[in-house]
Amino acid sequence: MDNSITQLIENYTKKDMLRFITCGSVDDGKSTLIGRLLFENNLLYDDQIVALENVSKGRGVKDNSGKEIDYSLLLDGLQAEIEQGITIDVAYRYFSTSKRSYIAADTPGHEQYTRNMATGASTADLAILLLDATKGLLKQTKRHLYITSLMGINNFIVVVNKMDLVDYQETYFEKYKNEYLDYIKNIDSHDQFSITFIPISALRGDNVSACSKKMVWYKGKTLIEALDSTEIKQSRSNCFRFLVKYVNRSNSNFRGYCGIIASGSVKVGDKILLFPSKRITTVKSIISYDKYPNDSTAGNCICLCTEDDVDISRGDLITKISDAPTLHDHIESNLIWMDENELSQNKEYYIKFNHKTVNGIIKINYKNDIDEFLKEKAKTLQINEIGNCEIALDEQIAVDPFELCEETGSFIVIDKITNRTSGAGVISSLGSKRVSGKSSSVFWSDTKVKKEHRTKLKQQKPCVIWLTGLSGSGKSTIGNTLEYKLLTLGYHTYFLDGDNIRHGLNKDIDFSDKGRSENIRRVAEVSKLMLDAGLIVITAFISPFENDRQMAEEIIGSENFIQVFIDTPLEECIKRDTKNLYRKAISGSIVNFTGISSLYEIPLSNDLIIKTLGKTPEDCTKQLLDHILDKLKIE
């Protein structure tokens, strides 16, 4: 290859990358600005320009050269965006200058699409905030400014656009500059902001990549110069945080864990701590592209290999022991509500962090008035409102304040009924509340004898056979019979029955929804220990809620979990009721009884469904045995 081409490629790959968003109110010219940047950096082909001119005809838009061309159409790709002349979804575009590569996110200005704007802000290093010179600082402009600051953006280029519509007068630029500076004084982190003010006309190209002859009073940088010279912020923390995105098994002798270092650094030989398992191991090697560096820092994409064969999955968090996060079940956060359904206090939502999804109940401390910066008492948050909230989680997880690490300090809220993303938040502080009996200083201790040794000794593949169904469906009978069949075939088993467990281990738990969840959590943890012992575990629990069954599968591991739905109609279960439990529940003497006064959620995803109606227990057991026998053999 020609040396000049090789040098060109090397120079290109060495350029750093800056991600920025354009934000502001409706019709401030965000899409037009990015379209103009693409045009002036010669990133459009001739046929694209011709097509753009054709579709722009009749829209009443002309640039400095007199061409009737609407640059916003380069970004507005949806038909509805073209028809209405608005931006709805986030559009990403890539371009380069001689000094830097860019990923630009064009975000919508309409209030109803604020959630899309927050999505674009979540990965940006810099925000270009546009103000319309004919309108100034509007409410939606303020909302976007507030959201970008919440998302940790400290670098701003404030662009006063459409200066051509006010005859390029300096007074307008100075007026809006002062309004902006007065407004941000009320934002807590404003002293950390880096701000550049530029007057431009995105449509006509003034001060975009070349200085405008019509604004000789402006002596500052053009927009391209400002972008090229902005110092990219580095990670705010030296604490090592690595989120596993992919498990690499390129061959049977290799296992590596791929992802991006969110913060801090790591080197070969470091002692690392894994979450959620809380196991400890050592970094064996680091792979980066085709190199094997001894260490790596924040922002790098690496494949990390460990000395020990430990269980690490996609979504796990890897940290160093020396700076590991603490476990918390109570957080304080700043929350942007994005759902048309209002935020309800005391309603349970999914709280999804980068590495973990848990249940949480949200309490609103106050909501923010972004105009007057008042803290208003509130019992709910409406769409696009921003509030300070406390969230009680149903288990302790490893998290950080957002200012320490963005990836482990941010989350989204998901409605459990609609499955919609309802809100996005950042952790402002961590609560001191702890779940009884748990400690953040307790870690899993590896033993010399491992599951693999016990598996080989017993000559069977351990697993958990999870039988779920209504009371009286036949779970215990089938489970008991299955264990006996497996025993006669030489397998090592243990049968966990719901009633037996509540006689001892779980006798302190009631039958409320929360109590049922805790009952299943404990059973799953016990099953996991028995699995580690190399046993085939059979469980017979109603486990009425889908979330709890999913939690059990997550604790045990999907590769070890066989869910079997014992499908028996409620009427048949009532007929089989030798303990008269259904009769008592119908009369009201037993409360929270599944199928009568408490819901049983039909399992949506099963490895096997056994319909018992018209079959004997022997028939049902044979169907189950036929299904699992091949799964129990060591390959």
Image (cartoon, grey):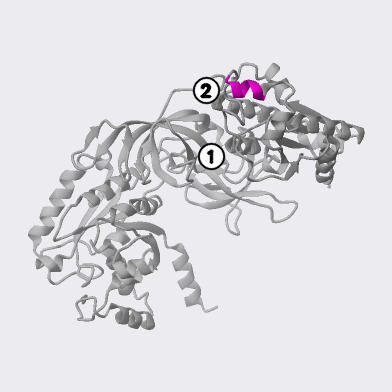
Majority SS type along the magenta span: helix
- The label on residue 435 is 2
Please identify the quarter of the rendering in which residue 24 is found: bottom left
| Nearest to N terminus: mark 1 or mark 2 | 1
Residue 587 is inside the magenta segment: yes
Q: Is residue 35 above or below residue 531?
A: below
Q: Is residue 161 visible?
A: yes
Magenta span includes 468: no
State which region is magenta.
582-588
The 10 Å Cα crowd at callout 2, few under 14, some 14 to 19, many 20 or more, is: some
What residue is disc 1 on?
Answer: 356
Q: Circle 1: is it few (<14), some (14-19), or many (20+) Cα within 10 Å?
A: some
Give the secondary structure at mark 1. Answer: loop
Question: Looking at the picture, which amino acid does disc 1 mark?
Answer: Lys
Q: Looking at the picture, which amino acid does disc 2 mark?
A: Val
Q: Is residue 441 visible?
A: no
